[in-house]
């Protein structure tokens, strides 16, 4: 599974850079001094930060510092993180980042009818994902743990930056923290006057402005089928592209595959006929939270949700039978060697009739 992470880097980052750099003319090639790039291992994945501009080096350094700061704050895998301390004590005063992220997670929880629920952590532990000691829990264990899975019971007081969790509840920001981190890196790029930039955090990519030659970034969407080429290529600027799928992290037991995206209603890995969900949005945090949520919701609910929120994001769905569906807002930006269906909002269909 580790090699999958490296494949993600190749796809998400190298493709965006390598394909794009092929198109760059010699005259437009930025000076070496104007380019900086760094690989960083954090949040259980390999991340790559790339920046162009006079202060590219400083910006990449600041981004690395920020990634490590957020990892130390948000990761359940770090014993001393703020989130781990909250899970132990069940209450506490939190940093602005944790408050922001919990608030956003709760909003997505409500909007997605509970498909995105950060209180899944006890289930993640029961399945052995955090410690990589994978096991299929007893049905009874899951039933018991489900009693503590309900984000509506989190008390967040944004004014005095404090959170209280119910007894036995624990939270996990793994489904949204990388998107928040890439949003923060865009802020750093802005403050350092970066000309062009990109960050790849595992399966998440976020682009800043256009490439130095003014052309758009090309981001390869990983194909969940191992050994196959990309699902397609998105040509974008100023957007985050976040993919979730059961193929990213899983184990097999008695010939059955169990993956890491849990349906908070059943306590089992979500099986909704989707292989992968890619969300495209200017808001990296939203894109990350939604990619996880829409995977849990399945195609029909995911597209219904998009129909009601089409101004906020677009989506590429791949089903287990290989069917690919792309929403209208990115139909023109997506190319693929595979056939794909394009879906429009009900409003747009009505307008065209
Ligand atoms: P992602 O790769 O962004 O889809 O996030 C998957 C991670 O989110 C998992 O490894 C868990 O840490 C966490 N997670 C799993 N299921 C859910 C869920 N239903 N809602 C929120 N977070 C989840
Ligand atoms: Mg996510």
Image: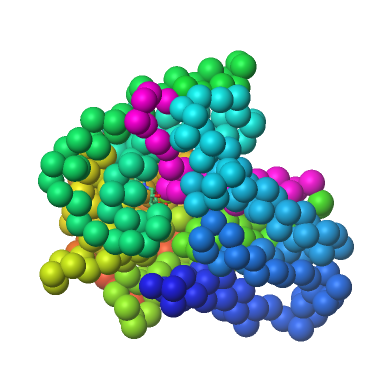
Residue 91 visible in the shown view: yes
Q: Tell me the residue at 56%/21% (across/down).
A: 162
Q: Is residue 331 left or right of residue 134?
A: right
Query: Residue 56 placed where, x, y %?
Result: 80, 62
Query: Residue 311 placed where, x, y %?
Result: 44, 38
Q: Tell me the residue at 32%/78% (across/down).
A: 226
- Quadrant assignment for the C terminus: top left
Q: Quadrant of residue 94?
A: top right
Query: Residue 11 placed where, x, y %?
Result: 49, 73
Q: Which residues, given as a range, are shown in magenta? A: 165-191
Q: Tell me the residue at 77%/77% (across/down).
A: 29
Who is closer to the viewer here, 189 or 27?
Answer: 189
Who is closer to the viewer here, 66 or 141?
Answer: 141
Q: Is residue 9 magenta?
A: no
Q: Quadrant of residue 130?
A: bottom left
Q: Tell me the residue at 46%/35% (across/down).
A: 87
Residue 111 visible in the shown view: no
Who is closer to the viewer here, 31 or 11?
Answer: 11
Q: Is residue 216 left or right of residue 277?
A: right
- Quadrant assignment for the N terminus: bottom left
Q: Is residue 192 left or right of residue 92?
A: right
Depicted 40 relative to depicted 304: above or below: below
Count of marks, rendered view: 0
Query: Residue 140 placed where, x, y %?
Result: 13, 41
Depicted 82 relative to depicted 8: above or below: above
Who is closer to the viewer here, 184 or 241?
Answer: 184
Q: Is residue 104 left or right of residue 37?
A: left
Q: Quadrant of residue 317?
A: bottom left
What colouring style does the render use? rainbow
């Amino acid at each position: 599974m580790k090699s999958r992470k490296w494949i993600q880097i190749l796809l998400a980052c190298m493709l965006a850079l390598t394909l794009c750099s092929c198109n760059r003319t010699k005259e437009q090639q930025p000076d070496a001094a104007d380019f900086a790039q760094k690989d960083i291992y954090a949040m259980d994945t390999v991340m790559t930060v790339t920046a162009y501009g006079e202060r590219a080096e400083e910006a990449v350094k600041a981004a690395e510092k920020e990634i490590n700061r957020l990892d130390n704050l948000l990761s359940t895998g770090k014993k001393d993180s703020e989130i781990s301390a909250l899970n132990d004590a069940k209450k506490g005063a939190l940093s602005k980042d944790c408050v922001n992220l919990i608030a956003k997670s709760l909003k997505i929880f409500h909007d997605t009818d509970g498909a995105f629920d950060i209180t899944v952590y006890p289930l993640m532990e029961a399945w052995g994902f955090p410690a990589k000691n994978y096991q299929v829990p007893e049905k009874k264990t899951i039933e018991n743990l489900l009693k503590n899975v309900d984000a509506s019971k989190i008390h967040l007081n944004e004014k005095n930056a404090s959170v209280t969790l119910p007894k036995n509840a624990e939270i996990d920001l793994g489904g949204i923290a990388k998107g928040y981190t890439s949003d923060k890196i865009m802020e750093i790029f802005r403050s350092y006057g970066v000309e062009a930039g990109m960050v790849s955090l595992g399966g998440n990519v976020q682009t800043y402005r256009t490439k130095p030659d003014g052309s758009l970034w090309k981001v390869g969407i990983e194909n969940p089928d191992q050994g196959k080429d990309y699902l397609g290529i998105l040509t974008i600027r100023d957007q985050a592209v976040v993919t979730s799928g059961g193929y990213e992290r899983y184990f097999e037991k008695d010939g059955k595959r169990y993956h890491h995206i849990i349906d908070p209603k059943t306590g089992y890995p979500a099986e909704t006929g989707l292989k992968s969900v890619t969300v495209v949005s200017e808001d990296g945090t939203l894109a990350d939270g939604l990619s996880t949520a829409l995977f849990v919701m399945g195609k029909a609910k995911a597209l219904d949700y998009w129909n009601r929120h089409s101004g906020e994001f677009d989506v590429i769905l791949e089903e287990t039978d290989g069917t690919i569906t792309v929403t209208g807002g990115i139909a023109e930006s997506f190319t693929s060697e595979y056939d794909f269906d394009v879906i429009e909002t009900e409003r747009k269909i009505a307008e065209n009739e």
